[in-house]
Structures are given as C-alpha cells and as structure tokens.
Image (tube, rainbow, N blue to C red):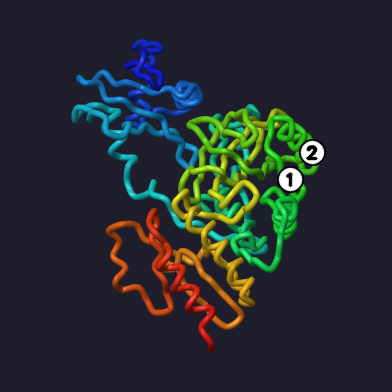
C-alpha cells in the first residue's frame, strides 16, 4: 500500500505495521490509542492533498480520505477508478460507508433560539487531554450542515436573496445587513454570533478574531468564530481568496450548489485542542453569488448568467413605471420555483430548465427560462405579464 500525490507519483510505501493498523481501522477493529494512530496517518495524508493506492489487485485501486460530518475519517474510491478484490478490507470498508446515511441532507433554517454549533465540545479523558478528531458538529444541534445552514439563514434574514431595482444597496451595506442579521443569534457556547463574526477573510483577521472570541467564551466552552467574505473558490484543503492567496482548511466544505466563483463563504475558526489559543479554519460553507459586488445567491454560472439578465430586465421595467423584485427561495424545498418575480399586484414563478428537461407540465403563472440558451422568449413573456393592463 502506498501514498501517492495527485499526479499518481509515489510518495512513500507503508510499512507492515502501518498496513496492519489501517486494515484493522477499515475493519472497525481498533480501540483506544490505536484509533488515534490510524487517524493521525489518515489526517496527515488528507492534509497533504495525497491519495492512497491499494495493493490488493492490479491495476491498483486509488482511494481518497473523506471526513464525515460526524468527524470520522472514511476511505472512498476515486471516481472512475478500479475496484478492490472481494476480500480486501479497504473495499469492504468503502462498501459499508457508502450507504444512505452519507447522502446530503436538506438545509435547515435557523430560527431565534436555535442551537448554532458547527463544532462539538472537546471531550477530555481522565488525563485532561482532548480527543483527537475535533472538527465534527455538535450532535445535539440536530443540524447536519450547520455552517451552510447558517450562511443561508443570514442571507435570507438580510434579504440579500431579494433584488429590488428601486433600492440601491452598496457592497458595504450588504455586509452590514449580514452583520445585523447575525446580531439576532447566539452560539451554543453562549457567546453572541455577531461578536464572533468578522466580515473579512485573511490569516491576520483570523488571528485577531481568535484572540477576541477566546476572551468572550464561558470557561470550559469551545471557542468558535466565523469569517464571512467573498472568495474565488475552494480546493481540496484550502480556500482561494478573492484578492489572491489561500488559507488552509482543516474541516470540510459545505456547498449550496456549485463551486463557480465568485462565492460568498462563511468559515468557522476554532482551536483543534482544548485550552489552545491557536486557531485554524474548520469548516467552510459557500454559496455562489451574482457578482463580486452583488451577494444575491445563485446555484452556479448558468443561473448567474440568467440572473444578471433578469436584473437588467427589472431595471428596464422600473423605467417603465413597474417595480418588480427578483427573489431566490432558499428554504422552500425541491418543489419551489428557482426564482420569483414579484410586483405590488403580480407574482410570476420562474423555472430554470436545461436541454432535455420536461417542462410541458409547468404550472400556470410560471415561465420556463432555458439555461445556456436564448432567454429572449422568456423575457417577452415576463414583460407581457407585468406591463399588461390589469
């Protein structure tokens, strides 16, 4: 068994002791310190953006290491790779962990009084040492994707998923709306969300925020802060900042949809050990936005193109004396429209369709807008709806 880099070059081979340890990890046979030894190996490989190559058969199956929301490391076969032989412990482990429990859950909207706990508390053993894997969300929160749920909740509360052509909002005012929304919530450790939030993402701001939140967290509680900013995108173990540079990522990424930048990102920062004042980036939640200066959430580049065209259209309608707002539902489930156009007297639902989608049964008062195709016919229907005399 070998560690390889992303190009397939061998970094090193595992010795017999390490292979035995990882096989027993795959068979779920480890207890105590042995679990930590295996976790340490897998954590280091993952942090170094490397993969594992299994020797059970040829061609060798290639695996990557995933971090579940529970905080547990699991092995995953790389897409399109070769299968393991039937008796391989790593192949069996992959099959066991690929059940429905790992599929993406629906996003949860936080309400006043909700438990916001993107990371669990440290659990000390009888020597006062914390457990080794500390990026998991708190189990009692009941929210599987707490960082992404919080990001979308703030966007919804700040009404940044609504574009009103009659109200011009600068970028700084949009971030102020997000800070105002954060002031309505508290973290599970008892501290204020607004006091633990910085709307700029950089290593220096992370260090400064970490010093601030340590002093506000009740004794014995885990310190957690949040960095909220626009970013270019994410990679395997890092965040690409909008103005250049990267920040290392220790946890996982929770995406609203695609990784097509620019993105609005909410990152947690927290120590990895109890009583430590050294903060790292834990988890990052991202949502694609319409543009670097407009924090209107979109699902990716195709929807971004449509949204920017619709924004031009609602400004044109405003010039004609009809104020029409564009809205993006974030929490209404799979049956909600992709976008909504709303005036004082009319509401029009928009369904974004790709080539091959069946849109013949679109409900009344709905316009189908093609993605990656000419939207002029859809725009004509929108204009007719809102400029038609009542």
Is 390 left or right of 221, judged from the image as shown? left
Is 316 left or right of 385, judged from the image as shown? right
Count of numbered circles in the view: 2
Among the two numbered marks 1 and 2 on one chain, the one whose residue lies closer to the N terminus: 1
Q: Quadrant of the N terminus?
A: top left
Is 119 left or right of 56, judged from the image as shown? right
Q: Residues within 10 Å of mark 2 (few under 14, many from 20)?
A: some
Question: Residue sitting at 28 percent across and 65 percent down?
Answer: 358
Secondary structure at badge 2 equals helix
| Residue labelled with disc 1 | 196
How far is the residue under mark 1 from the one under mark 2? 8 Å
| Residue labelled with disc 2 | 212
Secondary structure at badge 1 equals helix
Question: Residue sitting at 58 percent across and 83 percent down?
Answer: 345
For residue 11, above or below residue 92: above
Question: Residue sitting at 54 percent across and 80 percent down?
Answer: 387
Percent across and percent down for residue 285 are: 56, 45
């Amino acid at each position: 068994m070998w560690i390889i880099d992303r190009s397939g070059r061998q970094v090193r081979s595992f010795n017999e002791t390490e292979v035995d340890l990882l096989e027993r990890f795959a068979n779920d046979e480890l207890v105590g310190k042995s679990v930590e030894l295996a976790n340490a190996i897998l954590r280091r490989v993952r942090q170094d953006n490397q993969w594992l190559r299994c020797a059970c058969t040829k061609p060798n199956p290639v695996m990557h290491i995933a971090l579940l929301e529970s905080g547990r490391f699991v092995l995953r076969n790389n897409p399109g790779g070769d299968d393991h032989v039937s008796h391989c412990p790593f192949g069996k482990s992959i099959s066991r962990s690929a059940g429905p429990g790992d599929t993406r859950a629906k996003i949860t909207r936080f309400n006043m009084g909700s438990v916001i706990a993107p990371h669990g508390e440290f659990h000390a053993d009888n020597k006062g040492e914390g457990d080794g894997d500390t990026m998991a969300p708190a189990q009692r929160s009941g929210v599987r994707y707490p960082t992404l749920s919080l990001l979308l909740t703030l966007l919804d509360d700040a009404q940044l998923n609504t574009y009103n052509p009659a109200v011009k909002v600068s970028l700084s005012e949009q971030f102020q709306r997000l800070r105002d929304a954060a002031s309505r919530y508290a973290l599970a450790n008892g501290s204020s969300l607004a006091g633990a939030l910085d709307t700029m993402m950089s290593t220096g701001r992370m260090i400064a925020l970490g010093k601030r939140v340590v002093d506000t967290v009740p004794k014995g509680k885990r310190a957690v802060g949040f960095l909220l900013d626009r970013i270019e995108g994410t990679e395997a173990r890092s965040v690409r900042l909008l103005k250049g540079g990267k920040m290392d990522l220790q946890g996982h990424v929770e995406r609203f949809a695609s990784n097509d930048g620019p993105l609005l990102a909410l990152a947690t920062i927290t120590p990895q050990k109890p009583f430590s004042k050294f903060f790292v980036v834990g988890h990052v939640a991202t949502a694609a936005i319409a543009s670097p200066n407009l924090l209107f959430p979109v699902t990716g580049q195709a929807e971004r193109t449509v949204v920017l065209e619709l924004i031009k259209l609602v400004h044109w309608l405003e010039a004609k004396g009809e104020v029409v707002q564009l809205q993006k539902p974030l929490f209404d489930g799979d049956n909600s429209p992709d976008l909504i156009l709303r005036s004082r007297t009319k509401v029009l639902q928009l369904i974004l369709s790709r080539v091959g989608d069946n849109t013949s049964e679109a409900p009344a008062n709905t316009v189908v807008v093609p993605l990656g195709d000419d939207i002029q016919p859809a725009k004509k229907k929108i204009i007719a709806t809102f400029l038609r005399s009542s």
